[in-house]
Amino acid sequence: MITVDFNRINISAGSRILDIGCGSGRHTCRAYEIEGVRVIGMDASFEDVCEARGRLLYHEAIGAHGGGRWAVAAGDITNLPFPDASFDLLICAEVMEHIPDDSRAAQELMRVVKPGGRLVVSVPRYFPEKICWKLSSQYYSANGGHVRIYRRKRIRSLFENAGARLWAAHFAHSLHTPYWWLKCWVGPTRQDSNAVNRYHQFLTWDIMQKPRITRLMDMLLNPVLGKSLVLYFQKDQT
């Protein structure tokens, strides 16, 4: 499931990209498809890093890449092991809601982006997330520990105060919102709900097949039901 709209970002050959909180590597692999880039996927979970590595190796095996270079590593978003101004683009998708010291994390992300470089940050949208929390007291702990729900103004000011300028934003994954409401209603850790399992099968089919009808539905419903808020920033030149 790709949250970032790569068509909005001008990524040139040789660009250095960091996908922080890469999880299983979906955005790392998507970035690796771009010609000549150097991309690093980093996550606090060693298990997820191993999964991302396997996915990248598979992309290499089938030739689904742009001929660049990749690496994966485990790391802490509040203490990144990179020099200042190391990356042209930083992707931070569905990570900040897990970080207790989000101000420290934002400062670290800004530190490693080059002046004039770009950051793409996505977080769960306020009202779908709020309903999930209302439906289930287990939801935020069952999903890796969501420690807060962001309003748009808060997540925007977090990075603007650190020296970035917002230049674009959109919502994503509207078809996933009812799935999470349903999952929270029956219990987020349950595995035996027929309705939840069927909806999950539908979402998997949609991700793999990308039929036009569901892509159109997702686009039309995103302004109302989009599960994720995606923000595009540019770091100040100074």
Image (cartoon, grey):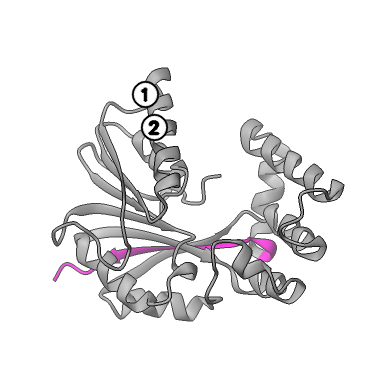
Q: Are marks 1 and 2 in contact (CB under 8 Å)?
A: yes
Q: Quadrant of the N terminus?
A: top right
Callout 2 amino acid: Leu
The residue at 45%/62% (across/down) is 95
Q: Which residues are magenta?
A: 224-238
Depth check: give the residue in front, 26 or 44: 44
Which residue is the site of mark 1? 60
Q: Is residue 235 visible?
A: no
Q: Secondary structure at mark 1?
A: helix
Callout 1 amino acid: Glu
Image position, residue 157 (x, y; %): 39, 80
Image position, residue 5 (x, y; %): 47, 49
Rendering quarter of residue 228? bottom right
Image position, residue 206 (x, y; %): 68, 38
Q: Is residue 237 magenta?
A: yes
205 displayed left or right of 28:
right
